[in-house]
Image: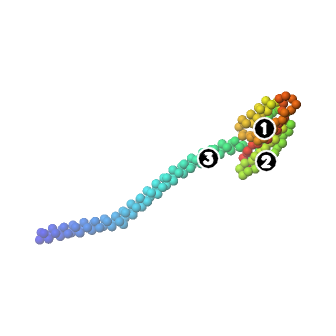
């Protein structure tokens, strides 16, 4: 009897152990494994989002640098305004350059404004006479100007007097619209 009793206890134990094992396997398959799979999927998504965040941060740095560069270039192009306002500012700027020099300005001709999507090109043709050294000073002032004035065309003609020449400059400046 004792053998039967031990045998039954073992059978009950093995049956209980098997039931617990099967139940544990079912719980693992039904609940734990999908959670692990979902967790692994979430970790992959997090890693992808981290990589995307790094890219976005890099793009933001590039965008900030581009915006800084744009603001710098915009400051060089000058203030916005109508064509007349911008031409007036441009002519005042040129006048400030050549009025300090003993040049005789014969004529100033405002050329037509060339417009693009983002900027305008202002052009002024100036005819003058003066000493060659003073003309060189004017060229230097134009080239060293902070406002990016360009000397597009230059024509210098000798006159009857030594070192005195006549000339025509076509000066231009790009400005914001």
Relative depth, front residue between 49 and 108: 108
Q: In the displayed image of the protein, which residue is found farthest to the top?
A: 162
Residue found 78% across the figure and 41% down from its top? 153
Quadrant that contains the N terminus: bottom left
Q: In the structure shown, which secondary structural element does the residue marked by tag 3 occupy?
A: helix
Q: In the displayed image of the protein, which residue is found farthest to the left?
A: 1
Q: Which residue is mark 1?
A: 94
Query: From the viewer's perspective, is 16 left or right of 88?
Result: left
Q: Which residue is mark 2?
A: 113
Residue density around tag 3, few if under 14, some if 14–19, many if 20 or more, within 10 Å: few
Residue found 22% across the figure and 67% down from its top? 14
Query: From the viewer's perspective, is 4 left or right of 67?
Result: left
Residue density around tag 1, few if under 14, some if 14–19, many if 20 or more, within 10 Å: some
Q: In the structure shown, which secondary structural element does the residue marked by tag 1 occupy?
A: helix
Q: Which mark is residue 80?
A: none
Residues under labels 3 and 1: Cα distance?
A: 31 Å
Picture quarter containing residue 95?
top right
Q: In the structure shown, which secondary structural element does the residue marked by tag 2 occupy?
A: loop
Residue density around tag 2, few if under 14, some if 14–19, many if 20 or more, within 10 Å: some
Picture quarter containing residue 168?
top right
Residues under labels 2 and 3: Cα distance?
A: 28 Å
Q: Which residue is mark 3?
A: 66
Image spot of residue 53 (x, y percent): 51, 52
Q: Earlier in the sequence, mark 3 or mark 1?
A: 3
Residues under labels 2 and 1: Cα distance?
A: 17 Å
Q: Earlier in the sequence, mark 2 or mark 1?
A: 1
Image spot of residue 92 (x, y percent): 79, 38
Q: Earlier in the sequence, mark 2 or mark 3?
A: 3
Above or below, 42 relative to 122: below
Residue found 17% across the figure and 70% down from its top? 8
Q: Colour scheme of this structure image?
A: rainbow
């Amino acid at each position: 009897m004792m053998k039967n009793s031990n045998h039954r206890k073992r059978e009950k134990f093995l049956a209980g152990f098997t039931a617990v094992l099967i139940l544990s396997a079912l719980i693992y398959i039904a609940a734990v494994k999908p959670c692990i799979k979902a967790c692994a999927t979430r970790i992959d998504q997090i890693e992808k989002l981290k990589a995307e965040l790094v890219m976005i941060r890099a793009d933001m740095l590039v965008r900030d640098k581009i915006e800084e560069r744009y603001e710098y270039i915009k400051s060089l192009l000058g203030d916005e305004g109508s064509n007349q306002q911008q031409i007036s500012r441009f002519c005042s700027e040129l006048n400030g350059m050549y009025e300090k020099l003993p040049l005789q300005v014969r004529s100033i001709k405002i050329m037509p404004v060339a417009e693009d999507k983002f900027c305008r090109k202002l052009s002024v043709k100036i005819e003058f006479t003066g000493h060659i050294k003073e003309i060189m000073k004017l060229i230097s002032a134009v080239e060293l100007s902070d406002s990016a004035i360009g000397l597009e065309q230059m024509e210098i003609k000798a006159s009857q007097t030594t070192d005195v020449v006549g000339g025509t400059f076509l000066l231009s400046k790009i400005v914001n619209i």
